[in-house]
Structures are given as C-alpha cells and as structure tokens.
Amino acid sequence: EAQVTQNPRYLITVTGKKLTVTCSQNMNHEYMSWYRQDPGLGLRQIYYSMNVEVTDKGDVPEGYKVSRKEKRNFPLILESPSPNQTSLYFCASSLATRPYSPLHFGNGTRLTVT
Amino acid sequence: KQEVTQIPAALSVPEGENLVLNCSFTDSAIYNLQWFRQDPGKGLTSLLLIQSSQREQTSGRLNASLDKSSGRSTLYIAASQPGDSATYLCAVPPWNQGGKLIFGQGTELSVKP
C-alpha cells in the first residue's frame, strides 16, 4: 500500500532532550516536506526536500533540522526541544521535485514538550 | 509574500445541500492550487489539484475552479452528505520559490443529517 509513515504518533518529552521524528514513503517520491499545525495558525512549512541531499527552509525552520540521505526517508530532528515546539507535525511527499503533483500526507505526530 | 485565506472558518449545512467553499490568494503567480480534506486527528488527503493553466477540475461530487486573475478558487460540493464533514484546506506553491507551499487555515464543514 502506498503510504507516508510517521513515527511515533505521540511523543511527550522534556525541554532540551534531543528527539527525532521519522518519516518514510514507499512511492519513490522526489519531494518531501514537514509541516506543523497549530490552532489559529494553520499548517506552516518547516523544511522541504526536492531530492536526495537537497533540503531547504520553509517558513518556520528555527529549532529544527532535517536530512535527506535516502530518497524514502526524511527525518525531522529537534536538537533542543522547547515548549513552543509543542504541536501536531505532518510529513508529506509528492512525485514531482516540487509540490506540483498531489501531496500524500502521513497521519501526524503529536509532540508535547514540557 | 503570498497569503492564502479561507472564509468562512466554519460552515454548517443540512444534508443534501449544494455548497461552495472559498479560497483566496494574494499573488496570482502560482503553479497550481490543491484542495485537501482533513478528518479529526488525521492527516490531509488531496482532493483536487488544478494546474495554473486550468480553469476547473472535477472528481465525483466535487468541482474545483480557479480564477488566477482574481486570486480565487472555489470548491463546490454537490448534494452534501454527513460523511463530507471535515476541514477543507487549500494550498498554493508560489512561483519561483522552490518547494514552498502555503496553506489557508481551512473551513470546518459540518453536514447535519
């Protein structure tokens, strides 16, 4: 089944403890991207990748890192999480190198930083 | 800077009604416009993608139109059903901004039986 898989679905952590949210797609998609969704602010793009080893900042990249060493994986890294990074996170992918074809989303990761 | 607005934020209609959801964008230089559906606690599902050269796209009871000159798109849902209840979002990739994608804040639709 074609899908975008995020793990974990729920995560509670403490301020400053490094964490990684994984994202994997099995559709051989070129483009992958991370978003956070907050009440009243909607979906905001954190980082995106147009191909292996090609990543770029979205609108809210501060406090996050990403890497794209393989086509299928695009992990989101929080080196020193803070409470303002408590949010619902989504990973998405699309066939084209840019978001010019339909996006496929994962089911989300709900992160709480205390 | 591209901004995407969806009004109203919430909409409640009786089952069977035809309805229109609105999406406005400030810069007409876009590659395409996508409409998504989000169910509570779930990820987004792509419904329709309209290329900048197209005027509309249809899928089943859904019809999306695009008017770049006025910076507007509409999602028309025919004969609404309770199962259509969800949040509907639109998103645009701005011209010459790589892989960026800007979302509207969504319209929460409730279809009452």
Image: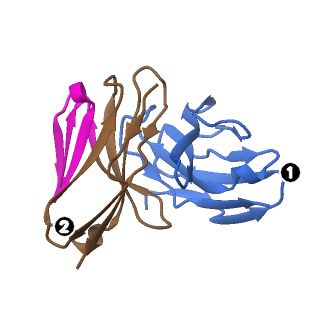
Chain colours: A blue, B brown
The picture quadrant where one finds residue A112 is bottom right
The picture quadrant where one finds residue B2 is top left
Question: Along the line of sight, which residue is nearer the eye, B71 or A91?
Answer: B71
* Kind of residue at badge 2: Ser
Q: Is residue A98 left or right of residue A109?
A: left
Q: Is residue B39 left or right of residue A83?
A: left
Mark 2 falls within which chain?
Answer: B
Mark 1 falls within which chain?
Answer: A
- Measured in 3D between alpha carbons, the distance from the residue under mark 1 to the one under mark 2, in whole angstroms, is 47 Å
Question: Residue beneath label 2, please?
Answer: B80
Quarter that holds the C terminus of chain A: bottom right
Q: Is residue A63 left or right of residue A88?
A: right
Magenta highlight range? B49-77
- Residue A16's tag is 1
- In the image, residue B46 lies at what x, y percent? 35, 51
Q: Are marks 1 and 2 in contact (CB under 8 Å)?
A: no
Question: Would you say residue A77 sits in the magenta stretch?
Answer: no
**Which residue is the extreme one toward the bottom?**
B113
* Residue at (48% x, 64% y) in the render: B42
